[in-house]
């Protein structure tokens, strides 16, 4: 698969300015797929300078404290920031990953950690988050907690998120970067990025390599 290398610094700047409003019809929801006019990508963007895994301690869907850095240490990990009331991008992204995960051999399925961190912690309680993720894949890890802490963790890997905002029609929209970051089991660093246009087939092709800590 063709991949494009970009620097983490350039990506962080671009990602912070590119937020997705789930359910929005505007073009503001475009994912970070390029950092210059000439840099074209397929599914995967391999980072020249990987991101350090966020030092986030939040609450999982069982109401227990969960240390993201410690509890995924040495494991191939996909991290995504989104919210359960999102009508389009978030459920599609998680569904695509779930489909791809099920195509893996059982041993590889057990190795892969998929972490969904809510950008709407006020509504995404451990219970509601757990029910939503169970419908996607019961092995997925859901985390919620203090918004400021979540926002800081997202920014540390180049993903911008804004506090949920109530619209005139009463709906609540969470603006967030729609990127999935893959972390290597070898280095625990985030070295591959996927945008919201990534398909289940793309993940199916790449996951076997990501689980080994290889470039897709």
Image: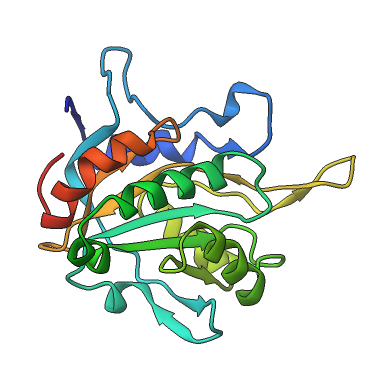
Where does the image place residue 115, in percent across and percent down from the top left?
Answer: 41, 63
**Taking 84 as reference, is 18 left or right?**
left
Is residue 80 depicted above or below 109 in this figure? above
Residue at the spot 59% in from the left edge and 22% down from the top edge: 27
Can you name the residue that lies furthest to the top here?
Answer: 38
Where does the image place residue 13, in percent across and percent down from the top left?
Answer: 39, 37
**Taking 138 as reference, is 118 left or right?**
right
Is residue 195 depicted above or below 130 in this figure? above
Quarter in which the C terminus is drawn: top left
Quarter in which the N terminus is drawn: top left
**Taking 214 as reference, is 40 left or right?**
right
**Taking 214 as reference, is 117 left or right?**
right
Residue at the spot 36% in from the left edge and 41% down from the top edge: 12
Q: Nearer the viewer, residue 47 or 180?
A: 180
Q: Quadrant of residue 179?
A: top left
Residue at the spot 46% in from the left edge and 32% down from the top edge: 31
Colour option used: rainbow
Residue at the spot 52% in from the left edge and 42% down from the top edge: 92
Q: Nearer the viewer, residue 179 or 61?
A: 61
- How many numbered circles does the render carry? 0
Q: Nearer the viewer, residue 97 or 37?
A: 97
Where does the image place residue 26, in percent across and percent down from the top left?
Answer: 66, 23
Where does the image place residue 129, in percent across and percent down from the top left?
Answer: 60, 67
Can you name the residue that lies furthest to the bottom here?
Answer: 64
């Amino acid at each position: 698969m063709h991949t494009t290398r970009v620097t983490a610094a350039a990506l962080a700047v671009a990602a912070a300015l590119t937020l997705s409003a789930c359910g929005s019809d505007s073009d503001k929801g475009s994912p970070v797929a390029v950092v210059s006019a000439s840099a074209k990508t397929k599914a995967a963007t391999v980072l020249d300078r990987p991101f350090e895994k966020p030092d986030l301690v939040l609450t999982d869907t069982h109401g227990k404290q969960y240390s993201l850095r410690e509890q995924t240490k040495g494991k191939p990990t996909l991290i995504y920031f989104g919210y359960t009331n999102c009508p389009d991008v978030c459920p599609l992204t998680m569904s695509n990953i779930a489909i791809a995960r099920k195509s893996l051999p059982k041993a590889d399925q057990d190795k892969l950690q998929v972490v969904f961190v809510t950008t709407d912690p006020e509504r995404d309680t451990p219970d509601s988050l757990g029910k939503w993720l169970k419908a996607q894949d019961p092995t997925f890890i859901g985390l919620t907690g203090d918004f400021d802490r979540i926002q800081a963790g997202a920014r540390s890997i180049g993903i911008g998120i804004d506090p949920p905002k109530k619209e005139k029609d009463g709906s609540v929209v969470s603006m967030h970067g729609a990127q999935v970051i893959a972390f290597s089991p070898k280095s625990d660093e985030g070295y591959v990025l996927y945008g919201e246009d990534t398909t289940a087939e793309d993940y199916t092709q790449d996951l076997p390599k990501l689980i080994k800590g290889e470039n897709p």
